[in-house]
Image (cartoon, coloured by chain):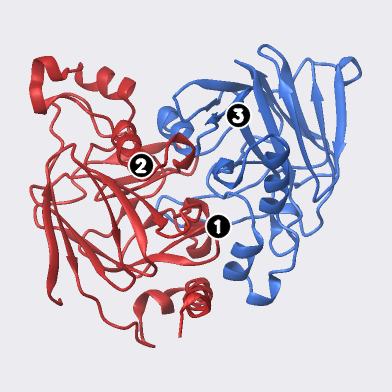
Amino acid sequence: MKESEMVAEKAGYRSVIGAGDYWWKTIRAGEVFRIHDLEGNQAADTLFYKAGDLAERYSASDTIKKQGALYLTAGSKLISNRGNVLLEIVADTCGRHDTVGGACSRESNTMRYALEKEPMHACRDSFIRGVQEMGGGIVDITCNINFFMNVPVTPAGELSFADGISAPGRYVEMRAMMDVVALISNCPQLNNPCNGWNPTPVEVLIW
Amino acid sequence: MNQVIYKVELTGAGMWSKVIGKGKILKLTDLEGGANAGMMLYNAEQRTERYNMPDTLKGQQVFYLRQGLCLHTDMGRLVASIVEDTVGWHDAICGASDCEEVKVKFGGLSYQDGRNDWHRSGRECFLIELAKWGMGERDGMPNLNFFSKVVTDEEGNLRYVPGNSEAGDSVSLRLEMDALVVMNTCQHPLAPGGEYVPKPILLEVFEGAAVGDDDECLLSHPENARAFLNTVDYHELKASL
């Protein structure tokens, strides 16, 4: 846990992302980017790309293996598929963020819950619209970070989607180490506790 | 086991990619102990559909793979099932080594100095094989590392477990769709440094058999059974009369 000294009122950019919406924006090297869990226990599914080059992107496996750590918190680096640091987490009042749970999709909802769940809105559809606007396609959607989501893994190798450990007003903040594009799907999932069974807005701020 | 229809020995730090048909069995054998087989899988006819680490793990509530579990794609379908396994733990998290890591751990050995014993990384081997199918960096995803074990503590600190696989250990995958299988035998990214000794693997493909109602993999989790139904739909819809 590490609190930030940044003042929200002085942020150069602020925007609220409704549940089920997507958002993307370029963050310049040196800028500080915060995701603010306004009402608590809201999974913010997030991908990062090098600005101007979709082929270099956040990589879950590179981030995990290079730091020998499964979860993200203050001090964690977000590492690309080319081994470069895209951003570094500089403040975190939640304490743990997921790297292996990925995004929900209409297709995976049929596998996980029931074939009849296919019509329900899911993160991957939001990611698809986001990367299409950015000039990319479905291959650019890789294994994302789930900020504020709790996916504990036991030493015996069991994995679960547990009740969130976030709460209203908690935030995670990171400094861009190169020009990056952030793409967020504010998760609409209603079938598991990742959003506390009630998807809510998150706010993004940039200094 | 049914008749073997293909057999090749992959040298240590070797690479390989082929399309294997639905129903066939891909068997990997660790010949000397301590091998690592990095693998990515793609639907052969629509390669944007691919093995998906998160869906595989959350669908089966596991952090690793073993006999009785399935490999899921991003389309709610199965690409393969693990029908035989003498190892019991295969890493699904840590991806592939890169050139920088291999150089730092093993000191670096160029082709000029080492000829075909030179040091390779999993990442470059994947990129070389992917290119032969018109694919590249944007097609990379967290790969499987057969024969390697990485565990976590409650705080998420990872630890590589040496000696997970012994000489003669094997794992067999039944392909659930025609799949492009891309592999290399570079060392696991968290394997200890020191001497550079990537290990060989025997790769065999066997004719398979129909999937029975009592199939261990499909019965192990209702998620696998539903993904299998999606896979059956996919094949029935595209089958010609």
Q: Position of residue A161 (x, y in %)?
A: 60, 56
Q: Residue at x 55, y 41 (%)?
A: A99
- Name the side, left or right, on which B28 lies relative to B47: left
Residue, far top = A30
Q: Residue at x 77, y 60 (%)?
A: A197
What label sits on residue B36 in the rendered view?
none
Q: Position of residue A100 (x, y in %)?
A: 52, 46
Residue occupied by mark 3: A49
User: Tag 1, which chain?
Assistant: A
Residue occupied by mark 2: B130
Mark 3 lies on a secondary structure that is strand
Q: Quadrant of residue B12?
A: top left
- Looking at the rendered structure, the kind of residue marked 3 is Tyr
Q: Residues within 10 Å of mark 1 (few under 14, many from 20)?
A: some
Residue, far right = A9
Whether A207 is drawn above or below A107: the answer is: above
Q: Which chain is red?
A: B
Task: Point out the image quarter for the C terminus of chain A.
Answer: top right
Q: CA distance from mark 1 to mark 3?
A: 28 Å
- Looking at the rendered structure, the kind of residue marked 2 is Leu
- Name the side, left or right, on which B140 lies relative to B115: right
Whether B179 is drawn above or below B212: the answer is: above
Question: Which tint is chain A?
Answer: blue
Residue occupied by mark 1: A160
Q: Nearer the viewer, residue B18 or B32?
A: B18
Q: Are marks 1 and 2 in contact (CB under 8 Å)?
A: no
- Name the side, left or right, on which B234 lies relative to A191: left
User: Tag 3, which chain?
Assistant: A
- Looking at the rendered structure, the kind of residue marked 1 is Ser
Q: Residue at x 27, y 60 (%)?
A: B88
Q: Which mark's residue is nearer the viewer, 1 or 2?
A: 2
Q: Residues within 10 Å of mark 3 (few under 14, many from 20)?
A: many
